[in-house]
């Protein structure tokens, strides 16, 4: 069989297998299997592009292969960290690769009560305060997540920077994508939201108790 026939058969076989992988990806609902099949598709098309001298396809999938491989590694790492966090603490360090850094100065307001909410923040450094409740948030706290749970997607309080610091922001769209890709992430968020809710309730109860006027017993008549 000459080189031209070999290239022709290789091209036909590559197209056939690539078509199978494309159809398979359409039937998948989660990201990790999609990434696996995307990597297999990249490898098949690279292998068939070499004998057919299809350099455009070769270059395209040579670029996509490491991208898909890195994304798969990232998602697998996320799943491992989420499972670890679900069974241990509520650290958000594993979410850092999906966030954007934002530096804040003292007096800066990150968001106002009742405005439209589209992201939440993880406090890396500095001091931040929820204005309406007076609750000061420590480093490592997640804030702004209740806007995602609100039916109208509005802020429930105003967040102000008290001391210069840095936060990591992640959009609700990214959170929803992570939830769809990894159901365990949804359970993690449920625990996180519940912990924050009970923490806020406890803090407010303590503040109310501190400001409550003690009952003074009336003197009995002599």
Image (spheres, helix red, strand yellow):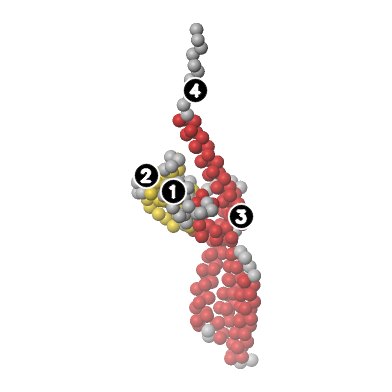
Reading the chain from its start, which is encountered first: label 2 or label 4? 2
Q: Residue at x 57, y 78 (%)?
A: 45
Classify 90 as above or below 21: above
Q: Is mark 4 in CB contact (under 8 Å) with mark 3?
A: no
Question: Of circles 4 and 3, which is in front?
Answer: 4
Classify 175 as above or below 41: above
Q: Which mark is residue 184?
A: 3
Q: Is mark 2 in CB contact (under 8 Å) with mark 3?
A: no
Q: Is mark 2 in CB contact (under 8 Å) with mark 1?
A: no
Q: CA distance from mark 1 to mark 3?
A: 30 Å
Element under label 2? strand
Reading the chain from its start, which is encountered first: label 2 or label 1? 1
Which residue has dot 1 on it?
A: 113
Q: Which mark is residue 67?
A: none
Q: CA distance from mark 2 to mark 3?
A: 35 Å
Q: Residue at x 51, y 12 (%)?
A: 220
Reading the chain from its start, which is encountered first: label 1 or label 4? 1
Q: CA distance from mark 2 to mark 1?
A: 20 Å
Q: CA distance from mark 1 to mark 4?
A: 35 Å
Element under label 4? loop
Q: Which mark is residue 163?
A: 2
Of residues 19 and 57, the one drawn nearer to the viewer in this rendering: 19
Reading the chain from its start, which is encountered first: label 1 or label 3? 1
> Residue 208: percent from the left, percent from the top?
48, 33
Reading the chain from its start, which is encountered first: label 4 or label 3? 3
Q: Residue at x 42, y 55 (%)?
A: 101
Question: Of circles 1 and 3, which is in front?
Answer: 1
Of residues 159 and 49, the one drawn nearer to the viewer in this rendering: 159
Which residue has dot 4 on it?
A: 215
């Amino acid at each position: 069989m000459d080189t031209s026939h070999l290239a022709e058969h290789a091209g036909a076989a590559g197209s056939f297998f690539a078509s199978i992988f494309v159809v398979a990806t359409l039937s998948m609902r989660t990201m990790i299997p999609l990434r696996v099949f995307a990597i297999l598709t990249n490898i098949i098309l690279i292998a068939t592009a070499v004998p057919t001298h299809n350099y455009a396809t070769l270059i395209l999938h040579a670029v996509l292969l490491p991208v898909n491989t890195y994304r798969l590694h990232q998602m697998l790492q996320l799943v491992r960290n989420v499972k670890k966090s679900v069974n241990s603490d509520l650290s958000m360090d594993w979410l850092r690769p999906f966030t954007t850094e934002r530096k804040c100065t003292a007096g800066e307001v990150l968001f106002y009560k009742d405005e439209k909410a589209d992201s939440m923040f993880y406090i890396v450094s500095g001091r931040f305060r929820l204005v309406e409740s007076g609750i000061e948030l420590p480093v490592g706290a997640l804030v702004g997540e209740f806007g995602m749970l609100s039916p109208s997607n509005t802020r429930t309080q105003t967040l102000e920077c008290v001391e210069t610091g840095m936060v990591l922001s992640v959009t609700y769209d990214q959170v929803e994508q992570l939830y769809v890709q990894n159901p365990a992430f949804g359970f993690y968020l449920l625990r996180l939201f519940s912990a924050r809710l009970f923490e806020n309730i406890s803090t407010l109860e303590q503040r109310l108790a501190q400001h409550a006027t003690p009952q003074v017993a009336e003197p009995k008549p002599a």
